[in-house]
Image (cartoon, grey):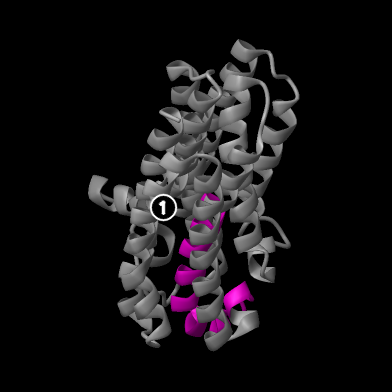
Amino acid sequence: MATVAQWIEGARPRTLPNAVAPVLAGAGVAAQLGAFSWWRTLLALLVALALIVGVNYANDYSDGVRGTDADRVGPLRLVGSGAALPIQVLTAAVSCLAAAAVFGLALVVATGHWRLLLLGGMCLAAAWFYTGGRSPYGYKGFGEVTVFVFFGLAAVLGTVYVQAGRLNWTALGCAVAVGALSSAVLVANNLRDIPTDTESGKRTLAVLLGDTRTRWLYVALAAVSVLVTVAVGLAHPLAFVALAATLLLVKPVRVVVGGHTGLDLVPVLRDTGLAMLAWAVLAGVALAFS
């Protein structure tokens, strides 16, 4: 029986910024549009948190039963390590995804934006089929694109839309910046796992690109966040303060470009996630006061 600490580690708390950051950025844009609602923001945050924890448990389950996690570097894998039974992790995954669906449905009913039900269904399907099902897209190199779409575009724009009922170019810019950094977290994760993923037959984008090109992809995504920050700042000068958050990317970029491997890349995930969270806080507050 897994301990509480093991269940928490299995939920991969270092990925939580990927859920919190887009909601904070979206709330900032909604405030800039004069439409901020604390309870709608809270519901959107609960959806994002439940979804990402559900994704993490679902990945743990699916990779574990396939044997992909038999020899993995990084955080504890509940199924792969034998700390928890597959059915227990599957139950945790389904419970979290169901909670995300309930929170999402409550938000749709409260706001009347029924078209978002389709987006919610797509989010749940993306969460499961990343590593689940007979032909998981995460094993075919589409993980980073999906993270950009759902934890970048969908999460930021969805948070704005349920409050303001409309979108603007600032919202899109924030969505691209958060999506790029969120994808960079996964790129760093998959860069670390190239050796074990190659051996197990998991063809992530990092495996397909190879070590060197994956490192430059990480740098490119970091650069996108800087360029978008400048673009948003030109429209809303207070948003230039978010450039301070991009300074937090200097250290992880150096580690990635420096050729570090294995456990040396674990801090890159943490530092990239913190940079994304700091960016969302600074940009969100700046936009709210613009």
122 up-or-down from 35: above or below: below
202 up-or-down from 50: above or below: below
Q: Name the residue under label 1.
A: 276
* Image location of residue 185, percent across then percent down: 46, 62
Q: Name which residue lies at 41% across and 79% down.
A: 256
* Image location of residue 252, percent across then percent down: 35, 71
Task: Tell me the amino acid under the disc marked 1.
Answer: Met
Magenta highlight range = 178-206
Q: Name which residue lies at 51% across and 54% down.
A: 230
Q: Does the magenta stretch include residue 179?
A: yes
* Image location of residue 52, percent across then percent down: 49, 45
Q: Is residue 123 magenta?
A: no
In this orientation, which residue lies closer to the viewer: 199 or 268? 268
What is the quadrant of the C terminus in the image? top left
Image check: 92 left or right of 232? left
Image check: 144 left or right of 22? right
| Quarter-of-image position of residue 66 | bottom right
In this orientation, which residue lies closer to the viewer: 70 or 272? 272
Q: Name which residue lies at 55% across and 71% down.
A: 220
Q: Can residue 70 be seen in this view?
A: yes
* Image location of residue 19, percent across then percent down: 46, 43
Q: Name which residue lies at 68% across and 13% down.
A: 112
Classified by dominant secondary structure, the portion drawn in magenta counts as helix
191 up-or-down from 99: above or below: below
Q: How many labels does the image show?
A: 1
Disc 1 on helix, strand or loop?
helix
Q: Can residue 151 be seen in this view?
A: no
